[in-house]
Image (tube, helix red, strand yellow):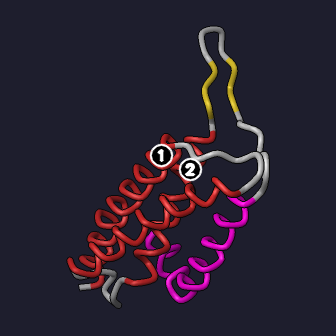
Amino acid sequence: MFKLITFLRPYAKYLLAVWIIVIVAVSSVPSIPTLKIHTQKTDIRLDYLIHFLEYGALAFLTYLSFSGKDFRISSNKYMILTISLFVFAFADESHQLIIPGRTFNPRDIISNLIGIAAGLVFCVVVFRRIARKIH
């Protein structure tokens, strides 16, 4: 994991920009069918898992892009990044109101926010360990 993260580090801001473009592009496509797993008792919607994963990855790339050389980040910067990610998640879902065939779904926002929180917690835990290895 350490080697992968140190390999990605120089490209993190570029990957972040590409990932943001991908998120906005996909959410701008009209009428994407809802992915479901059908079971005997219920249908499980996979789009919530997809939202969780895409925003977890966004949080990871954002943290990696703005952390210092020792992979740490100040409390103020952490709060600004968290708020910015939450605003982006809300704006991304809200802009679907003007896309034909798309709707605003509060559950998607919740999945986005949980993904962001999980991604940031992952970063804090993993990057703290990496910082210890560096020092």
Q: Please check the rendered image and state whether residue 18 is part of the magenta-colored stretch, yes or no.
A: yes
- Is the residue marked by circle 1 packed among few (<14), some (14-19), or many (20+) residues within 10 Å? many
Question: To which residue does mark 1 refer?
Answer: 111
Q: Main secondary structure of the magenta part?
A: helix
- Is the residue marked by circle 2 packed among few (<14), some (14-19), or many (20+) residues within 10 Å? many
Q: Quadrant of residue 130?
A: bottom left
Screen quadrant of the C terminus: bottom left
Q: Up-down: is 96 above or below 131?
A: above
Q: CA distance from mark 1 to mark 2?
A: 6 Å
Residue under the image location 36 percent in, 56 percent down: 117
Q: Please check the rendered image and state whether residue 59 is part of the magenta-colored stretch, yes or no.
A: no
- Quick one: label 1 or label 2, which is nearer the N terminus? 2
Q: Furthest residue to the front? A: 98
Region of the chain picked out in magenta, as a range: 1-28
Residue under the image location 34 percent in, 69 percent down: 83
Tag 2's secondary structure?
Answer: helix
Q: Which amino acid type is marked by label 2?
A: His
Left of 106 or right of it: where is 114? left
Left of 111 or right of it: where is 47? right
Question: To which residue does mark 2 refer?
Answer: 51
